[in-house]
Amino acid sequence: MANIQVDVESSRAVNVRLPSITNTVCTVKISLSRLQSSVDARVLNSNNLRLRLRNAHKDVAYIEGELQHLHRTIVRFLNQYEETEQTVNSMVSNENVGNVQSAPTGKREKYSQRFSFPSKH
């Protein structure tokens, strides 16, 4: 099994910038709407400009939604990762102390018999 480690603090520092980026995308979306409403109808009707602006607006709105979803997903992942890491570290600490009680049966068994972890070098 591969040993995976995530630098949670660095990941959070990067993720904290996503809302700002999302706001910039939202500003572009709003600007596209304003542009469409400020252009003369004859110009909008030429060369499918109205449709192209509408499609650009939809594309930018989609990107905005994806960035929001990405931000929420990263927050959830990092929280779950930290929680899992704390649980594993607790289990490893218990292994160093001795036996761990198994939850379903209440029987005590050696932790190392239930789980195997890659050695840290």
Image (cartoon, rainbow, N blue to C red):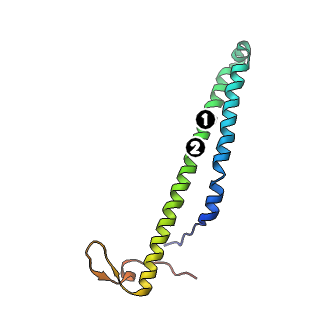
Locate residue 90: give its quadrant.
bottom left
Q: Residues within 10 Å of mark 1 (few under 14, many from 20)?
A: some
Identify the amino acid type marked 1: Ala
**Residue nearest the viewer, comparing 45 with 72:** 72
* N-terminal-most mark, 1 or 2: 1
Q: Are marks 1 and 2 in contact (CB under 8 Å)?
A: no
Residue 12: give x, y in percent of width and height. Answer: 61, 59
Q: Image height check: is 49 above or below 3?
A: above
Which of the numbered marks, if any, corresponds to residue 61?
1
Q: Residues within 10 Å of mark 2 (few under 14, many from 20)?
A: few
Q: Residue at x 45, y 71 (%)?
A: 87
Q: Which residue is mark 2?
A: 66
Residue 56: give x, y in percent of width and height. Answer: 66, 31
Residue 58: give x, y in percent of width and height. Answer: 60, 31
Q: Residue at x 72, y 12 (%)?
A: 42
> In the structure shown, which secondary structural element does the residue marked by tag 1 occupy?
helix
Q: CA distance from mark 1 to mark 2?
A: 9 Å
Residue 98: give x, y in percent of width and height. Answer: 39, 87
Which of the numbered marks, if any, corresponds to residue 80?
none
Q: Image height check: is 27 above or below 11?
A: above
Identify the amino acid type marked 2: Glu
